[in-house]
Amino acid sequence: RIMDLSNKSILICDDSILARKSLKDAINSYASGATFYEATNGEQSVSLYKEHHPDMVLLDIVMPLKDGISATKEIIKENADATIIIVSSVGTQLQLKKAIEAGAKDFIQKPINQAQIDRLINIHLGGES
């Protein structure tokens, strides 16, 4: 059964269009109806967050103009309860720790797999723990 997310919005921020598409596809195959916003850099993600206050933010760490850690800090300043999920590649363990300290709620590892996405949606949007 596909979860209904028609009252939820998700901001996906990654400088790779492919990475954004694969995240969106993975979310849509588990839950339908969400509104998506897409950002290509950290600066854009912060302004889109302030404009739309999405229910969940998927944030890459390594991005142009502003990295995921700085973006996390700014979003948390705007809303301390923001649900920020860091999408990190192998080798970003130190940055990942910094992002969690900055207020990110969770993380997934690239390349992403469906089980990780399903878990994230259940925990952060479905109310399951």
Image: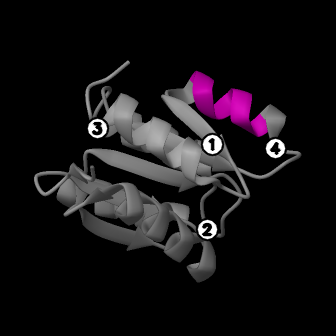
Residue at the extreme right: 91
Q: CA distance from mark 1 to mark 3?
A: 15 Å
Indicate which disc, 2 or 3, sits on the residue closer to the N terminus: 2
Q: Give the x, y percent position of residue 113.
A: 64, 53
Residue under label 2: 65
Residue at the extreme front: 1
Residue under label 3: 125
Amino acid type at mark 4: Thr
**Above-or-below relation of 95 to 18:** above
- Quarter of the image where the C terminus is located: top left
**Above-or-below relation of 43 to 99:** below
Mark 3 neighbour class, 10 Å CA radius: few under 14, some 14 to 19, many 20 or more = some
Instruction: Tell me if label 4 and label 1 are in contact, CB under 8 Å.
Output: no
Indicate which disc, 3 or 4, sits on the residue closer to the N terminus: 4
Q: Nearer the viewer, mark 1 or mark 2?
A: 1
Amino acid type at mark 3: Leu
**Residue segment shown in magenta:** 95-101
Label 2: state its secondary structure: loop
Residue under label 4: 92
Q: Nearer the viewer, mark 3 or mark 4?
A: 3
Q: CA distance from mark 4 to mark 1?
A: 11 Å
Q: Is residue 89 magenta?
A: no
Label 3: state its secondary structure: loop
Mark 2 neighbour class, 10 Å CA radius: few under 14, some 14 to 19, many 20 or more = few
Q: Give the x, y percent position of residue 1.
A: 27, 49
The disc label shown at residue 108, or none:
1
